[in-house]
Image (cartoon, helix red, strand yellow):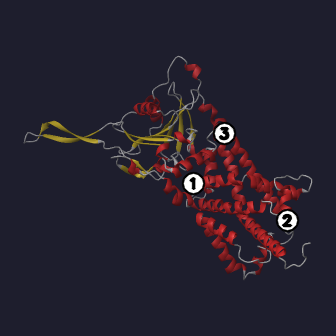
Amino acid sequence: MVSSNPNTPLADTQSTQKSRYFLTWRWHFYAGLFVVPFMLMLSITGLIMLFDDEIESARYGEVLSVNPDAYSSQAPLPISAQLKAVQQAYPEGTVTQFVPATSSDVANRFSVTMADESTQFVLVNPYTADITGTIDRSDSWYQLANDIHGTLLIGDVGDYLIEIAASLMVILLVSGIYLWLPSDNARRAGFLKIRTNSGTRTLLRDLHANIGGVLSIVLLFFVLSGLAWAGIWGAKIVQPWGSFPAQKWDDVPVSSLNHKALNHGSEEEMPWNLELTPLPESKGHVHGEETASGSASGKGKKVGLVAQPIGIDRVVNEAKALGFTQYKLNFPRSESGVFTVSANTMSGDITDPTQDRTTHIDQYSGKVLADVTWRDYNTVAKAMAAGIALHQGDISIINKIANVLFCLAFILIVVTGAVMWWQRRPAGQRKLGAPPKAVDSGLWKVGVVSVVLVCVVFPMAGLTIVALMAMDVLICRYMTTFKDALS
């Protein structure tokens, strides 16, 4: 028989487990309070971004479509003729990019920065060079969803808030897994089961715990790959490890601009590992030539002659010769700039990250100055390139469908968690309804180490936890009303 003495080792063990359970639940609850609205926002905007092509086709189908059957007897016009039509139609604008059509029934695109600094996609019929219409790049649903997804439309502050939420999501995941695993009879009863006949609260708990537990690794993947864009963890810590070193290029002068300068607004068009890498420069556009009439000494005089840039047709032909099929061609941004042909999964040009390629071409000689492929990526860069492609649903239709289901599942996790809290909260009281505190059972080393590791790896989570602990010491302990509200 088991002794009923509350001081037995079994009773002590059960008391310790109960204390740790409620401590973990409180961590889970407080992290969830901050994370839930962000997780809901990220899932909804992620769904919109997954259907960017379909939304764009529905909105701009008339100006995007071309009927190739009407031109079956003629070949597409040279790209230079199409470019000339755009330049004549928008003499005040600057053409910065050419995007070839994905199929014969779709118009080609030229990105034009207008005099008012707006950026438009000018759509051109490749068979006639007629302009079929324009698309404001800042007016797309994808762009709006992407801006909300990344910055909440409030710049760096929004980026930091989202990074804090994503970092705390790791604590939410770790604590959630601990609460989900079947270490006692109560949790064992609902482990990997959806009990539909035990009341609403039990049903919500089973949906929340089991979907969250089963998809915890998937959610962690989305968190880590998404943090690649974050201002601190991504740009300051991880991205420099994966950046391509320009020193690998032989005898190529580099610009003061980096690859990120080629992005249009917040659209991520350049590969993640190249964004911080300086662009190469064309090797010179002025050469000397001796004139026939010389000075009094009889010697000819050297004058500077400006070399002419190569035409876009030659660049397009070079891109095809290198093996590019679908790509974006960025025009030189200055007299020393280069043509940049890029095909990568990050911008949706291709679906296989192992085929990523970025090539820079001298705008005067046509020589390939730099050529970066998947083979040149280091381990971190390869992992992020593949992870970002999966994150965006670019690999295949299966990847896209799976991501849609994951987003819907994450929304369900958020909704069930919020409803459970609403049902449990003290009615008519100004309290959050946090899980109750258990009797202190001493220092929980595993718990402390887990939280410290998360805080070290994800600095924004660490800073937030330190700030909350400071608030607890400086405010909650001396302000009874505030302390009661958080209880």
Mark before the other along the chain sequence, 2 or 3: 3
Callouts 2 and 1 close, C-beta under 8 Å = no
Considering only vertical position in the picture, is 235 above or below 451? above
Percent x, y for residue 393? Answer: 64, 43
Q: Mark 3 points at which residue?
A: 55
Residue picked out by circle 1:
229
| Coordinates of residue 302 in the picture (x, y in percent) | 18, 41
User: Mark 2 is on which residue type?
Assistant: Arg
Q: Label 1 amino acid? A: Trp
Q: Horizontal and vertical percent for residue 354?
A: 54, 41
Give the residue drawn at x 47%, y 25%. 77
Q: Estimate the spatial distance between the alpha carbons at disc 2 and disc 1, rounded to whole Å.
A: 36 Å
Q: Of callouts 2 and 1, which one flags the residue occurring earlier in the amino acid sequence?
A: 1
Q: Residues within 10 Å of mark 1 (few under 14, many from 20)?
A: some
Please determine whether, in this image, residue 254 is positioned above or below residue 313: below
Q: Nearer the viewer, residue 214 or 225?
A: 214
Q: Name the residue under label 2.
A: 424
